Image (tube, grey):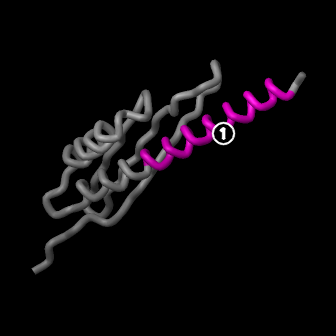
Amino acid sequence: MLVAPALLAAVTAVFQAMLYFRGVQVARLAAAQGLTATQGLSGSTTAGRERVNDVLDQLGQPLSGVIITVSRSAGEARVTITGRVPTLLPGFAVDVRADTAGPVAVFRP
């Protein structure tokens, strides 16, 4: 009698885990691409933000409520993405975050 509900719960948990790990992977990919666009010689925070949005659009916007933070100083560029993964269970919210940083390219003759 309890086999069907337990099996349904297990399958739902597997699919929820798949959605979570895909969300983490997408956030990391978008952050890495945004960092590359930000840290180049002609890079900027605007270019990094646009690249992050392009990557998320190409992947079908798998995250909701996305917050993109891009910063660039004289020595470091940083991109942070926070978003919410789609959920299969009502009232079960899962957030993901990807933070990446690296040095800014500098031309020294």
- Residue that protrudes farthest toward the right in the picture: 1
Q: Relative to residue 28, is residue 15 drawn left or right?
A: right
Is residue 38 depicted above or below 102 in this figure? above
The answer to which image quadrant residue 46 occupies is top left
Q: Please give the residue where the numbered disc 1 appears in the rendered image.
A: 14
Find the magenta span and give its range: 3-27
Residue 7 sits inside the magenta stretch:
yes
> Where is residue 36 shown, x and y percent of the image?
27, 58
Q: Relative to residue 88, is residue 28 drawn left or right?
A: left
Q: Which residue sits at x=28%, y=53%?
A: 72
Is residue 14 depicted above or below 2 in this figure? below
Q: Residues within 10 Å of mark 1 (few under 14, many from 20)?
A: few
Q: Which residue sits at x=42%, y=46%?
A: 26
> Where is residue 4 shown, x and y percent of the image?
80, 25
- Residue that protrudes farthest toward the top in the picture: 90
Residue 84 sits inside the magenta stretch:
no
